[in-house]
Image: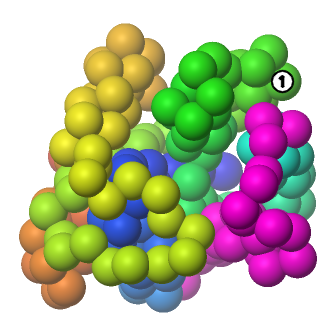
Amino acid sequence: MMRIAIVGPESCGKSTLGKALADHFQCGYVAEYAREYFATHSHQNYDLHAVITIAQTQYQQENAMAAKHAHLICDTSPLVCRIWAQVKFGHCPTEIEQLELATCYDGILLCAPDLPWQADPLRENPENRAALFDIYLQHLNAGSTPFRIVTGHGAQRLACARQQLSTMGIDL
C-alpha cells in the first residue's frame, strides 16, 4: 500500500494535480470531501463541528479506497483540516489531531501558491495564501513524513510532482 497526500493553501491546484497523478499512475484517488459536504450544507455559517465531520468522513473515505487500491492519491489530509481549524477557529480539536496521528502517508506533496487565485464560493483566503503555505511548511518540517514542494503551471506542475515523488523514492 502506498499513500500520497496533496496539501496546501486554497486555489493552489491540489484537486487538479491529484486527479492528474491518479490518471497518470492509474491508481486510486480520494477527492476532497469538503466540496461534497458543502454541496448539502451551508458554507456561510459553518462551525468547528463541520470541520471535524469533514475530517472524519475524509478519513473514512480514504480508508475505504485504500481497501480497493494498492496505491492512493489523496486530495487533502488531516493536516489540511488542522490548519483550517487553527486559522478559522483558533485551535485544532482533539478529534482532528487523532486523525492526523492515525493516518500514515508515504509522501506528501505541498502545492505552492504560485497559480493565479480562482474565485470559488467555498474559498476564504485569497489574500494570505503565502502565509498559509508557510504554516504548512512549518508543520511538515516538524513531522517525519517525507514531503516535497510542487510548483509550476499545467503540465509543468504534473512533471514537477512526478519528479518530486521520484526524489522521495516513491514509484507508483
Q: Quadrant of residue 93?
A: top right
In the displayed structure, does residue 97 sit left or right of residue 15? right
In the displayed structure, does residue 66 sit left or right of residue 7? right
Relative depth, front residue between 163 and 5 = 5
In the displayed structure, does residue 67 sit left or right of residue 109? right
Q: Quadrant of residue 91?
A: top right
Q: Which residue shows up at 72% across the image and 64% down it?
A: 43
Q: Which residue shows up at 51% across the image and 51% down it?
A: 5
| Location of residue 104 with respect to 20 vertically, above or below | above
In the displayed structure, does residue 76 sit left or right of residue 25? right
- The residue indicated by pointer 1 is 95
Mark 1 residue type: Glu
Q: Residues within 10 Å of mark 1 (few under 14, many from 20)?
A: some
Looking at the rendered image, the quarter that the C terminus falls into is bottom left
Percent across and percent down for residue 42 are 81, 67
Relative depth, front residue between 106 and 108 = 108
Percent across and percent down for residue 46 are 78, 51
| Location of residue 40 with respect to 169 vertically, above or below | below
Q: Look at the image and say whether residue 121 sits in the magenta stretch.
A: no
Relative depth, front residue between 147 and 2 = 147
Q: Which residue shows up at 20% across the image and 43% down it?
A: 130
Q: Is residue 143 in view from this perspective?
A: yes
The colouring scheme, among rainbow, by chain, secondary structure or one colour, is: rainbow
Span colored in magenta: 25-49
Percent across and percent down for residue 160 are 16, 65
Tag count in the figure? 1
Q: Residue furthest front?
A: 45
